[in-house]
Amino acid sequence: MYFAPYMQYVRSIGTVAFAGILLSTLPGCRKDAGPARWDIDVALPLFTTQLTIGDLIPDSLLAVGADGTVSLVYTSALFAVDLDTLLGLPDTSFIYAYAFPLPGNDQFNLPAGFPVISQNNVLRFDLPQVQLSRLDIRSGELQVDMRNKITSRVLGHFEIPSGQFPDGVNALDMAVDPGTPSAPAMATLIRDLSGTRFDLRGPTYNQVNTLTTNVAATLDPDGSGATVTNQDSVVVQVGYNALITAYAKGYFGTNTISQEDEESRLTLFDRFVAGSLDLDQVTMRLHVENGVGMDIQVHLNTFQAINSRTGVTVDLQNALLQGPINLNRAADLGNGFTPSHYLRTLDNSNSNIDAFVENLPDRVRYGVEILLNPLGNISNGNDFLYYESELKADLELEVPLSIIASGLTLENFSRPDLPGDAENPALDRGTLHLFATNGFPFDARVVLELVDEENTLLSTIEVDGAVRAGNIGPNGLVSSVTRSTLHAPLDAFQVDLLYAGARLRTRVVFDTDADLGHVRVLDSYALDLQVTVDGNYIVNGQ
Amino acid sequence: MRYGLFLACATLFTASSHGQVALPPDPIVDLNAGYRNTITVTGLFDHNANSVYNELPLAIVRGAYLERDLRARSSEALRAKGNSLGEVIQARVQWTGATCWGARANWRPVVSIAHHDQIGLSFTADQFDLAFFGNAAFEGRTASLSPSGYAQIRYQTMGAGLQHAANGSYLRLDLVSGLSLAALNVDYASLYTGEDGQVLRSALLGDYVASDTAGYDLGRTNGLGAAISGRWSFTTRPAEKARFSIGVEDLGFVAWNDRSVAIRKDTLIRYEGLRVYDLFALDAVIVNETTVLDTFGLRYDHGPVTRLLPFRVFAEMMIPLNEQWRLTVLAEHRHLPGYLPQLAAQASRVFGSRTMVGAALGYGGFGGLRAGLSMKRRIGEHLLISLSTPQVPAFFTGRARGAGLYVGLDLGF
């Protein structure tokens, strides 16, 4: 934006565009030199805008009190432990095979309907430390492969007596065509296990992680039987793949999950690139939610505010870091759960949270140790979790905007869209004027710099003047606005830099009056800005 | 003799259309009137202005960089209001045949085709300064932009008619092909520029029409129309030597097609810049021609437009002083913005049997006082060449106002 459209506007002031008219009068006589060019001095308003606290801080982070005072409320996830960490189910396969134990070249005839396989088995899932008595599947599949070397069609039957598919059945039937030892026939059946429930207590209902299965294979009763040798066999392979838990119950074991030097991004202060902020009051709430049906103990070992720009790290000091956070187990409602919650509030009175926040961190670093079932199997095998269950911790920061700002700097990059290009610049030089009507209790200085893609400073545009703070009344609030004018001349060299692709770095440096101490910010405060330009423009320059 | 008069009148007919006094007919210098066919080819360029020096439009045509001094010289010469500038570019080919009717032997058929490109512009000194120096010099005050107007029309005619060989009277009907039109009329306009450009405030009462903006090439027809041209030449008494003529050229219209655009504004505009809602996302603000047009409410209406052609009316008196000398006085007016009635007088003399030379003074039209020269010379018996300029000083200095050249060829066979 900026200049180019306005220059078009200048040229399109139809009633005054004598030049364009004159140019257009002699098209047949014009030579290849192109249209005539000349410079004009323009004075144009570029844009107006209003800056409110909502522009500095997103509305979603603002809370406005009844008296108009503004608080910043920022929520960020700290850590989370989800289902995969708590209970991961491995892919599991079982093979049921039957070969005919005949010596040498013996052979014999099997009649139609002969049962080649009939096995009742138990399948044990390999789940270290976890003892599941029930497992509901959210997604996954059961794959049954049959390989037949007998010269008869073979019918297979697979049954899970302790399981139930969503349609109420628990058996699968399939068939495999006749084969030979040199060319066995193959058949595969895949069953979606979504919604399937498994009772993992085994055939006697006193085991864990155990699934009862029956496998049978018979020669086709409608066939003519088969002559078999010791080379003939029937193999059934059953696989449980990509199982995702919808619900699990049992004892999940005692375990420790450590997360050391984990970092969480904090974007709240990203726009501030310099300066300091003194906050009157800061409140931070640590909220931990346990959606898992087991007792959990959390040790928060470290909690640091890191400012990558300054390199300063502030350690949080609070009793929170001295002792464990004990989290009760969630409550199982049968078709869902009610998580347990833990809330700890930190403020200026019980911590150094103000210094923590005043560090303007862009990251927080923490070390946490999570103990699962620290007291062992006190639920007698009634731990549970749902697919939605997780252990998570959030930070909620509440900062009433009563502040002292010293050189607090906002930064923004833009690339002005100038008329013409580097070879044919239509703008030669100019002066930007900024007219400010300030209702904020901050002074503001504007720093304009031209930088390259690597932010290397190419040139500084001198800005004459500053935005003065609104007038503060006896109640500490802004009683009237102030008006200020700033001028920023761009010389030909700087304009050339812009045409060459330089970026405009705009920094606004805020300061409050130190004598006033903390100043409150109201929702109604605003800064009205108008930017105009005096420029030397080349008509038909581009 | 009658044929001579006829051909003289034919020449007069074409020459008189270029806004300067044509050399009068002469039976000795002009082609023999006995030819059954006469082809006349003419070309005219006539530029005139009452305040802007020629050096400025010349530099614009050349595509040069316009130095401030160059612009300032014309600016200093401007009147506060009533500045004008215009051009006429015209090319014509005409065939004149032999007598058609025995009873009316003086009337001859004529067929002609012509191309016209005419521009008229009236403007204020503030408009000129805004265009050539910008609005910065107007900070804190109001620029007066009216009354002003502009018209540029490009059209072609093809027509037929009759011409009287004895007195030069004629009547011709033309079919008109409209190529392009742009016409602006500003009844009232002003522009106030605030200090440091804080505000632009404009009052505007005016209208603008234009033909289809998709193209202006010569082969494109954006409108159709018709026109009539005629001249009545007479004397007050049969023996009177002074001859009077009155006439009109291209009195007609063009109905421009429904892709034409028009806008009429009677409005006050106050502009303090585009409203930006996120100061930190200036790059994302889309400002283009559409935004600007919407901001200022400059959207066109589309639809057919009918406009008069830039017709010309004239009255002329030619007085033979003796066998060699003649005095011609011409008054004329064109229907173009900025054009004032023009008055011109020319004295001409015959040299030998082949050459006539004239000197003219003119005042009015788009400009002020002009001094021109004309000559025509017969080469052999079949070819007559005419050459004239309405402003001789233009060939010697860029500080003159107005320039032009007329070239005519008459071929009889």
Image (cartoon, coloured by chain):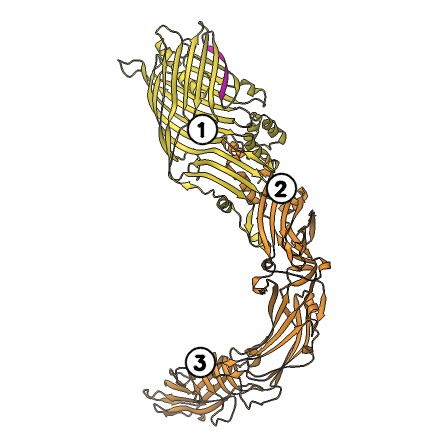
Tags 3 and 1 in contact by the CB under 8 Å rule? no
Q: Chain of mark 2?
A: B
In which quadrant of the rendered image does the C terminus of chain A lie? Answer: top right
Above-or-below relation of A423 to A304? above
Q: Nearer the viewer, residue A47 or A259?
A: A47
To which quarter of the image does residue B98 belong? top left
Badge nearest the viewer, 1 or 2: 2
Chain painted orange: A
**Which disc number belongs to residue A534?**
none
Q: Magenta segment, which residues?
A: B352-365
Q: Nearer the viewer, residue B396 or A91?
A: B396
Indicate the position of residue B290 as horizontal and vertical percent values.
49, 46
Indicate yes or no whether the magenta region holds residue B359: yes
Q: Amino acid at mark 1?
A: Asp
Q: Secondary structure at mark 1?
A: strand
Q: Is residue A274 left or right of residue A96?
A: right
Q: Which residue is mark 2?
A: B196
Chain painted yellow: B
Q: Which residue is mark 1?
A: B117
Q: Secondary structure at mark 3?
A: loop
**Which disc number belongs to residue A195?**
3
Real-space CA distance between mark 2 and mark 3, rounded to the nearest whole angstrom:
73 Å
